[in-house]
Amino acid sequence: MPSLPFSLRGLGRGVVNKPPEIQEPQLDAADNATHLVVLIHGLWGNPNHLSYLSSTLRKKYPEELHILVARSNSDSFTYDGIEVGGERVTHEIEETLEYLSKRGNTITKISIIGYSLGGLIARYAIGLLYSHGWFEKLEPVQFTSFASPHLGVRTPKVGIGNQVWNVLGARTLSVSGQQLFTIDTFRDTGRPLLAVMADPESIFMQGLAAFKSRTLYSNVVNDRSVVYYSSSISRTDPFVDIDNLDINFLPGYDPVILHPTHPISRKESSNNALTLYDQSRALARQLPFMAFILLVLPLGSVLFLLNSGIQVARSRQRIRLHEEGRGAMGAPGRYRSIPLMARGMQRSVEGVYERIEATTRQDTLSGTAESVNEDEEDDESESDKPLLERDNDSAKDVHMNGKTANGTNGYSIHHSKSKDTDFPVLALTPDQFAMVDALDKVGFTKYRVWIHEARHSHAAIILRMSRESFREGKVVVGHWVDNFEV
């Protein structure tokens, strides 16, 4: 294994905590390999979390790929924000490309894969790579996210617990928390970073649209880190009452991966009224959680807040060093001077909506996805489509036409019909609704995943660690590898 062309040493300069001992990313392949695949871990993560993804891909394609498992944001370094994390990963990718070039390897293709927060860091890095002209030299082949919070992690549910989560969670994860809860203001845009990253005119969306395919895998239940609506880029959550649905699985991958174009249908005999037996079962399922709340949470909360305070302070110090150019990648100026909008100018921010937290009194809007859309003014808008109808569009139904005659990027959308459009629309923020519409227009193939055996499906979806209850993750990773385009 050759020595790596980058180092983590400078990232922790002046900071007490250091990155963990980790396995080296796999950069070796046959000299004729021309495709670089980049894997990016999530919050509190490290490259070991992606070992099953990496090893399975390597086993399937032993000679065709170079695999880079990004390591510049390991563990608490993920507190430092999507922007800083994206800059680090971009630097890592560029140095790796330079390193491979010096070795005599000719790279012509690139694919970028993100898990959890890594999906957002990947999208940020894609914008920087696009703006640096890399996609004129390399063919962007595949972007994939696994359980990534594309709409952030703010919960639209009412209740004191959820309100506390939205306020406290945003302030205990440093800059990453502010960006994930969309309470930040990115640079001089007057808008949250996630909203800027989903702006159709931004370098981030232009870069994303350049990929040959865009795919996401989203947990439908038991994901305690990233809720379904965010990882699936959806305005509804049909799986809240999954017992009232008939699940249509993808042949060969059942009972784990749902069919991408027709994932669900309502049970004809479905009765929304809960029986006493159903209520008793629901209460029984909640008892362990209630015991946890009463016995463990108070002490755990104190320890969590103490640790969060320490990590936030360290994160601020790392960010300051990064801004001063005293990190491993040097000064970030070559990434900060890039215009965020593809046309070299930022959109007007007049009329930006106020935060919905101040006015939300319910977790869903009045009516269903279908009825809410009927009230929209623009009949041709993608936001007028009932949500599941949009979600059911496959990669074959939604695609990018690329550049139009006048040089602007245009989209071509072909709709497939679905009768399952009567699910309540979640009380998302206006920014989140705009993200859904913009990301849907770019076009994703969406694979919904039902992990049955693990109560922590967020870790199981990629088999983040070797655990028997996570074995269904092998089906998910197997499907991804089976459909990976070399």
Image: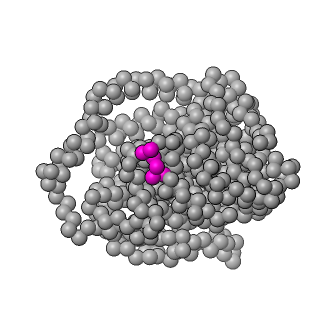
Q: In which quarter of the image is the C terminus?
A: bottom right
Measuring from the top left, give residue 88's x and y in whole percent: 68, 42
| Identity of the residue drawn at 86% across and 49% down | 102
Side (left or right) of 170 relative to 26: left
Q: Which of 202 and 138 is in front in this view?
A: 138
Measuring from the top left, give residue 83's x and y in whole percent: 62, 43
Q: Quadrant of the N terminus?
A: top right
Side (left or right) of 338 relative to 247: right
Examine the rendering and report whether any part of residue 351 can be seen.
no
| Identity of the residue drawn at 20% across and 47% down | 281
Against 421, residue 79 (above or below) is: above
- Give the dominant element type of the magenta stretch: helix, strand or loop: helix
Against 319, residue 373 (above or below) is: below
Measuring from the top left, give residue 258's x and y in whole percent: 42, 63
Specify start and end residues of the magenta stretch as a single range: 468-473
Measuring from the top left, give residue 453's x and y in whole percent: 38, 48
State the image quarter where residue 332 is shown: top right
